[in-house]
Image: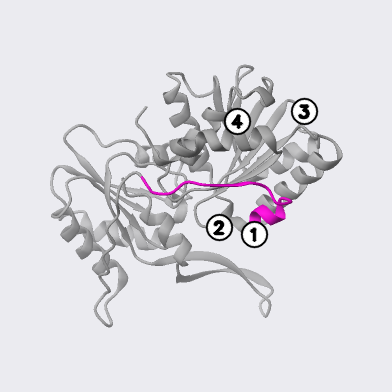
């Protein structure tokens, strides 16, 4: 396996969890924490042959992380490493690492508060804070204190304030990984005044394709913007460039096709929503174009309903997106 920045702190992380039941790992995007850490901890003595469960915020990231780790072991997914997401399960009696989405973990804790058979719960990308992740951590802390003193908890994030999380976890040790696999150069190319988003993004894609040799990952706020940008790009892309889309409503097979490596001699332009923001590796990406917008659900108290609102991305989100550049 090629060396990643996270590898330098894995011995420190292993030692911390051998001494304490809780730990916080801070590592920048692209450091390799999602796929390196579970494998590094798998044979620790304190785990005693029990399983690791890792929480991922998104189904696509959960499937991709499990498949990547399985490849590192030269196995098929579902053997040592498997996953469970809504409407899809790929595990076996041999599975030791389960990558799950947030709703799955909540149900596991409701059915078995002791998490029998599990020795470690990893909360990946915890900065994406939501009800399921917070509830899962609270239930795990309760189980640890009342039922399972031997249960270990690890919270990992690229952008969250590690000191505050460590305090929440009763002054848990903090391990910090510095650096990233590849240097990232940030350039700002604002649209001309009164310009629409999609034509400006399409023009930027065509320009950047002439400046980099690999594939591009392009972040847009929603499926509508992706379709309109794809229409503008379709007839202008070079013959060696594939155009693919990646958003939540696509079938799983199409999502998997979007993140698969480009065929030999070709490169890809992947038009994606925030689904590709974290814990996702798209091989061959050499440039990231970020429209700087994302669509989120917000409750409107006057209307009494939740609406999708388009707004600027937070700095932490922008850093995560830049980290998808290999």
> Mark 3 — residue?
116
One can see residue 237 in this view: yes
Judged by depth in the image, the label closer to the viewer, 1 or 2, is 1
One can see residue 252 in this view: no
Judged by depth in the image, the label closer to the viewer, 3 or 1, is 1
Q: Earlier in the sequence, mark 3 or mark 4?
A: 4
Identify the residue shown where x is 68% and y is 42%.
Answer: 22
Marks 2 and 4, how far apart in space?
A: 24 Å
The percent position of residue 67, horizontal first and vertical second, equals 46, 30
Q: Nearer the viewer, residue 72 or 230?
A: 72
> Mark 4 — residue?
98
Q: Nearer the viewer, residue 64 or 73?
A: 73
Q: Is residue 101 above or below residue 315?
A: above
Q: Earlier in the sequence, mark 3 or mark 1?
A: 3
Q: Which residue occupies the extreme right position in the image?
A: 146
The image's mark for residue 164 is 1
Residue 89 sits in quarter = top right
Q: Earlier in the sequence, mark 2 or mark 4?
A: 4
Marks 1 and 2, how far apart in space?
A: 9 Å
The way the protein has been coloured in the rendering is one colour
Marks 3 and 4, how far apart in space?
A: 14 Å
Q: Is residue 307 magenta?
A: no
Residue 43 sits in quarter = top right
Marks 2 and 3, how far apart in space?
A: 30 Å
Q: Earlier in the sequence, mark 1 or mark 4?
A: 4
Marks 3 and 1, how far apart in space?
A: 29 Å
Residue 48 sits in quarter = top right
* Pointer 3 with pointer 1, Cβ within 8 A: no
Marks 1 and 4, how far apart in space?
A: 27 Å
Q: Which residues are magenta?
A: 164-180
The percent position of residue 278, horizontal first and vertical second, equals 46, 49
């Amino acid at each position: 396996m090629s060396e990643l920045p996270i590898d330098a702190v894995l011995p420190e992380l292993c030692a911390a969890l051998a001494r304490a039941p809780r730990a916080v790992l801070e590592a920048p995007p692209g450091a390799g924490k999602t796929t390196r850490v579970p494998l590094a901890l798998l044979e620790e003595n304190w785990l005693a042959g029990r399983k690791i469960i890792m929480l991922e915020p998104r189904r696509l990231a959960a499937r991709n992380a499990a498949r990547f780790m399985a490849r590192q072991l030269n196995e098929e997914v579902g053997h040592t490493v498997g996953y469970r997401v809504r409407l899809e399960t790929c595990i076996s009696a041999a599975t030791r690492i389960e990558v799950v989405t947030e709703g799955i973990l909540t149900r596991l804790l409701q059915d078995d508060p002791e998490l029998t058979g599990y020795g470690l719960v990893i909360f990946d990308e915890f900065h994406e804070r939501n009800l399921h992740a917070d509830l899962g951590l609270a239930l795990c802390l309760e189980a640890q204190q009342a039922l399972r003193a031997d249960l270990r908890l690890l919270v990992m994030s690229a952008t969250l304030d590690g000191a505050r999380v460590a305090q929440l976890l009763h002054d848990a040790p903090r391990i910090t990984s510095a650096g990233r696999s590849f240097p990232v150069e940030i350039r700002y190319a604002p649209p001309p005044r009164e310009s629409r988003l999609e034509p400006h993004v399409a023009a930027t894609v065509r320009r950047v394709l002439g400046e980099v040799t690999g594939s591009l990952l392009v972040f847009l706020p929603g499926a509508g913007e992706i379709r309109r940008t794809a229409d503008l790009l379709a007839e202008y892309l070079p013959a060696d460039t594939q155009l693919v889309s990646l958003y939540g409503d696509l079938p799983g097979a199409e999502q998997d096709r979007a993140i698969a490596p480009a065929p030999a001699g070709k490169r890809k332009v992947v038009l994606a929503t925030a689904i590709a923001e974290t814990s996702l590796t798209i091989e061959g990406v050499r440039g990231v174009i970020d429209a700087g917008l994302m669509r989120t659900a917000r409750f409107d108290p006057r209307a009494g309903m939740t609406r999708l609102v388009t707004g600027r991305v937070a700095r932490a989100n922008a850093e995560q997106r830049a980290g998808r550049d290999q």
